[in-house]
Amino acid sequence: MIYADYAATTPVSERVCSVLANATREVFGNPSSLHSVGHAAARLVDHAREQVADLLGCLPEEVFFTSGGTESDNHAVRIAADRRIVTSEIEHPAVLEAARHMSGQLDLIDTDPSGSASVSSLAHLLRDREVALVSLMYANNETGVVQPVREAAAAAHAVGALFHCDAVQGAGHVMPTVRELDCDLMSVSGHKLHAPKGIGVIYIRKDIVENVPALHYGGGQERGIRSGTLPVPLIAALGEACDEARERMHEDDRRVMHLRDAIEDELLTIRDSVRLGSGERMPGILDIAFSGVGGEALTLLCDLHGVAISAGSACHSGDLSPSRVLLSMGVSPELALSAIRISIGRYTTAEEAERIASTVRTCVALSLGSAV
Ligand code: PLP
C-alpha cells in the first residue's frame, strides 16, 4: 500500500519509535515524585519541552503538553469563553465547533476563491467591536493553503484581542516562529509530525499565562493549566520528533514539494480536472477534483488499487456532504463532492509519487468508463 494521506496522520519515525520504546521501558517514574526515579522522568520532560520550544521558537516555559491538536484548540478557545470570537470559515472543527459552543458571539471571516481567509473581511469584523480572540489556522488541512497569519495577528492585536493559530498542519515544516507570527497561542499535534497520536502542545505566550484558566483541576501539573500525570514516553517522543523535524524540514519540504508538483502536473492533464486552492500551499498537499467522478468512490477505488488518499478531509470521512471549506471558496457542491486530497510527506519516494499519479489516473478512467 502506498500511503498518500500525510495530512490525516504521519508514520512514526524510527528515531521517535526508539525514544518512545526506551522511555516506556526505562523511565517509568512519575515526574512529580521527589525521588530520583521521578527526577529521571522530569528530566526527560524538561528536555522535550526544550526541543519543542526550539522548533516553535519560544521559551520552554511557554510550552504546555496536551493530548493533541483538538485539546489545544479547545483550550485556546476556552480562554475567550462567553465573549466575542472571530475565526475563519475554513478552520478545523476543533476550533469551529469549540467556538460555536463556547463563545458569547461568533463571527466568521470570509474565504477568498484562492482558499485564503480574507484579510479585508477580518478588518470589517473587527471594526467597532470588542473582540476577545481571533483564531486563524496556519495552513488549511484540505487545500494546504497557507493563511495570512501575520496580518491576522496584527489586526487582532490592534483591537486588543488575543491571537491564536492552529498550526497543526504547519508545525514540523518550514514555518515562521511563534514570535515572527506574533501569536499569543498556538496549537500543535504530535501525530502530524511523525510522533505518536495522543500528544500535542499548546504554546501560551508568557505574559498571558497568568490569565489562562485551568483546563481541568487536579494535581496542578503543567503549572496548574493542565492537571494530570504527564505521559512521559509520549512527551519524550514528541520532543525527538521536533528535533528530527528541525534537522530535516528544509530538505524534506523541498523534495516533497517537487514530488507533489509532479503528481499535480500529471493529474491536471486529465480533462475537467481542477486544482482547489492557490497561492502559497503546504508542500505535500494537493486538493484536486475530477468533474463527474465522486471523490468518495474514487478514494475507495484507489484503496483497492493500493493507494491510500482521502476524500476531502479524513476527519469528516463518513460524512457525504460537500466540504464546507470548498463551498466557502465558491466551489460548486457538485465539484466539491468530486474532490480528493493527496498528501505526501517525508517517506514518499519518487517511484511512489509516480504510482500515485498513475493509479489516480487509472481510477478516474475506470470511474468515467473511458480513457482519460
Ligand atoms: N487542526 C487541524 C488543522 C487538523 O488538521 C487537525 C487534525 O486533522 C486537528 C486540528 C486535530 O488534531 P488532533 O488529531 O491531534 O486532535
Image (cartoon, rainbow, N blue to C red):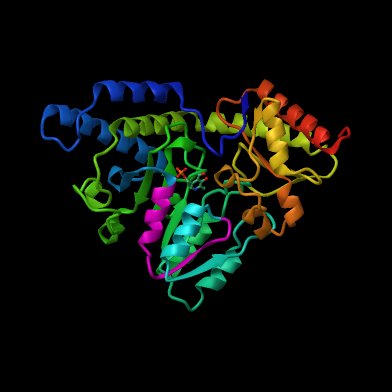
88 left or right of 47 in image: right
338 or 142: nearer the viewer: 338
185 or 190: nearer the viewer: 190
Reply above or below: 64 against 363: below
Reply above or below: 331 against 80: above
Residue 228, position as x, y percentages in the image:
25, 44
155 left or right of 285 in image: left
Q: Residue furthest left?
A: 35
* Quadrant position of the N terminus in the picture: top right
Residue shown at 83% from the left, 34% from the top? 365
159 left or right of 143 in image: left
Residue 219, position as x, y percentages in the image:
18, 47
Q: Residue furthest right?
A: 370
Does residue 372 show up magenta in the picture? no
Does residue 84 show up magenta in the picture? yes
Reply above or below: 257 against 318: above
* Quadrant position of the C terminus in the picture: top right
Residue shown at 42% from the left, 71% from the top? 104
Residue 51, position as x, y percentages in the image:
35, 35
Reply above or below: 333 against 15: below
* Residue 108 falls in image quadrant: bottom right
Residue 280, position as x, y percentages in the image:
63, 47
Q: Read off the magenta span.
A: 70-90
289 left or right of 177 in image: right
